[in-house]
Image (cartoon, coloured by chain):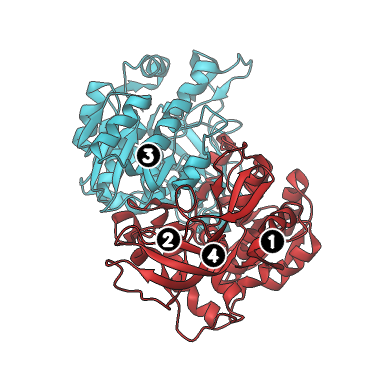
Chain colours: A cyan, B red
Amino acid sequence: MRATVMYGAGDVRVEDVPDAALREPTDAVVRVLRSCICGSDLWPYGSMPASEHGQRMGHEFLGVVADTGAEVPGLRAGDLVVAPFVWADNTCDFCREGLQTSCRHGGLWGHDLDGGQGEAVRVPQAQGTLVKLPSGIGADSPLLPSLLTLSDVFCTGHHAAVTAGVGPRTTVTVIGDGAVGLCAVLAARRLGAERIALMGRHKERTDLGREFGAAEVIAERGAEGIERIRELTGGDGTHAVLECVGTREAIETALGAVRDGGVVSRVGAPQYSEVPMDFGTLMRNITLTGGVAPARAYIEELLPDVLGGTIEPGLVFDRTVGLEEVPDGYRAMASREALKVLIRP
Amino acid sequence: MRATVMYGAGDVRVEDVPDAALREPTDAVVRVLRSCICGSDLWPYGSMPASEHGQRMGHEFLGVVADTGAEVPGLRAGDLVVAPFVWADNTCDFCREGLQTSCRHGGLWGHDLDGGQGEAVRVPQAQGTLVKLPSGIGADSPLLPSLLTLSDVFCTGHHAAVTAGVGPRTTVTVIGDGAVGLCAVLAARRLGAERIALMGRHKERTDLGREFGAAEVIAERGAEGIERIRELTGGDGTHAVLECVGTREAIETALGAVRDGGVVSRVGAPQYSEVPMDFGTLMRNITLTGGVAPARAYIEELLPDVLGGTIEPGLVFDRTVGLEEVPDGYRAMASREALKVLIRP
C-alpha cells in the first residue's frame, strides 16, 4: 500500500510500504477515508534530522473497518470509525479517568506503527481506540471533514477550553489563529463563553475565528497584545487564556493576559522548557494547565453537535489533496498557504 | 506602643512606634492577643538590604477590637477577631469569587501600615477583613493558637489542598515539613485524602506530620525523593503534590512526583522565576496551581473544626515569646531551633 514517510526536515515522500494487516487479536485494520496534516507535523518537517528509515506520518484519520481481530467484539468490517490521535485500551485506570493519552497499554501512531497519512492503518487496541460512527454516513458525506477533526484538532481545542474551566461566565483569550486556535474558539463558544478574543494576524484565519465565535481579533503580540487584552477587560485580563501556539512568546503572553485567579491552558506543543511562573503569578493565583488532549474521552460528547451541524469544525480545512500530493500539502501548510490540509487517499 | 521593625537581614528590633489609631471610617483598631512569626518573614530576615526606616512586621494576628470607625457596623469594642494575612473589603468582585488576595481595595500588612507583631493594629477595611470569633473565648483560651493559624498558616495549607483538588480518592505528597507543610498534611487529611506522604527530614516535625495524618515520611530529596514516591505508588506518583517550600528543588521534585493528569499546587513563596513545565509535563497533562492563600475565604468554613477540636493546627507552635523577645524568636526560627514561634504581646 501507499503511505507517507518523512525522511528529514522538508523531506516527505509517499511510498510503497507493507500492507496494513492484523498482528494481534486486539487489532483492526482500517482503510483510510480521510486523513490530514497536523500543525504538530510541521515541527519535524522543520527540524527532523535526516533518517535512513524515515518516520511514518499521520495521526488523524477516519475510515472503514476492513478486518478485525478476535478480541474486537464491537466492530465489524464496513463500520465507519474515527480514530483519536493516541490509541488506548479505554479500560485501564487512566482511561477510565478520561486520560487516554496516559493509557497503560496505548501509544502514538507512527514509529513502528502505520500512520494515518496512508491507505490503511493497523489499529492496536481497536476495541478501545476506535469510535464507531452512525451508519448511513457515506464515503462522500460533507460531514467527513468535521468528523475527522474529532481525531485531534477539535478535541484539542475543546481540551484547552475544558481544562481552563470555560463556561458561561468566562472571558476567554485564544492565542493563535492556527487550526487548533480556531477550534479552541469554537469549543469555548460551544461551552458558552461570555466573550472570546482571538490573537492572530492572518485575516482569512481570524475571519473564520469570528465566524466560530470570537468577538474581538487582536493582531498585536507580546506586551502590546497583553495591553490590548487588558484594555478590553478594564485592566483585568481574561479568566481563561487558551495557548494554542507553543512558543515561549505565546506562553508569556498568556501569563500576561490572564486575570488574577485565572487559568492558562496550553495545548500547543511547547518549544520551550521553562515557564516564567514566578512570585507574581503566585500572588495572582494563576493556574497553568492543559496538555495533550485525550481526544478519546471527548468524541462521544462532541459527536452529536457535529452530526447535527450545530458546529462545523471541518471549516478549518481549506485545501484537499490526494495521497500522492501529500508532500505538497506539507509545503503549503509550512508556508502558510494552507491553514489545514485534508487528505483523500 | 511597642512593635516589631526589621531594619535589614538579621536585624529585627522591638521599638516604640505611634499608637495604632483610627484614620478612615472603615478602620478598626485591634489590640493584639496573639501573633506569630511566619516562615515567609524569614526570607527578608535572610536577605533584606539595610534600611534606615525599617519595615513593620507581622501579618498573622488575633485580638480584641478596641475601636471602630463609623463604617464598621458589624464589630464593636471587645469583640474577639482574627485577621487574615491580606486585608480586603470582602465585597468586590474578586472577594465575592473567594480571591480576597486580589481585592480591589485591599493589601498587605506592614509597609505603611501596622504589622501584627506589635501591641495593636489599625485594620483597614475592617468590616470586610476581620472575622468575629464566638464570645466566651477568653484571653487565655487554649484554642487561641489554633484560631491564630486561621490568619495564614492553616489556611495556606488548606489552599494548597483545595486548589490541588484533594478529596477522598486522592493520593497526596506534601513537600516540606515546615509549619505550612504540616498544615497542608492536616488540611489534606481533613478533606479526606486517601493517603498522604510527607517529604521532610526533621524528626520532631515529621512526627507531628504523622500525627496530622501523614502515612509515610520521606527524608530523601530530589531524584531520590521522587523515586521513593514512585515506589510507594506503583511507579505512578501521587494525584496531588502540595509544594510548601518555594525552592527550585522543591518545585522540580513536585513535578517529578506527580501522577499523569495530576496537580502540583504551590504555596511556598517561590525563590525561583522559572518552572520546568516542558514537553514532558504537557504529554502528562500536569497542572500547576496554588498561590497566595485567600485566608478570608476559608476562615468561616474551617472555624467549626477548630472550635470543636476536630483539628488542632495550633500544634505547629512549639515556642512562645513575649513581644520584647521577638528578635530571639526570629533567630530561633531561622536556625530551625523552633518550628513556629507564637507571640503573646
Measured Cα–Cα span from mark 2 to mark 4: 11 Å
Which quarter of the picture shows residue B278?
Answer: top right
- Depth check, mark 3 against mark 2: the one in front is 2
- Residue B191 appears in the rendering: no
Q: Is residue A281 above or below residue B161?
A: above
Question: How crowded is the residue under tag 2: few (<14 C-alpha within 10 Å), some, or many (20+)?
Answer: many
Tell me the kind of residue under disc 3: Leu
Under circle 3, the secondary element is: strand
Q: Nearer the viewer, residue A84 or B232?
A: B232
| Quadrant for the C terminus of chain A in the image | top left
Cα distance between the residues tagged 4 and 1: 13 Å
The residue that disc 2 covers is: B122
Residue at 23 percent of width and 48 percent of height:
A194
Question: Please, what is the three-letter code of the amino acid marked with disc 2?
Answer: Arg
- Alpha carbon distance from label 3 to label 2: 42 Å
Q: Give the residue at x 38% y 60%.
A: B98
- On whether disc 2 and disc 4 are found on a single subunit, the reply is yes
Disc 3 crowd rating (10 Å Cα; few below 14, some 14-19, many 20+) is many
Numbered label attached to residue A242: 3
Q: Nearer the viewer, residue A225 or A216?
A: A225
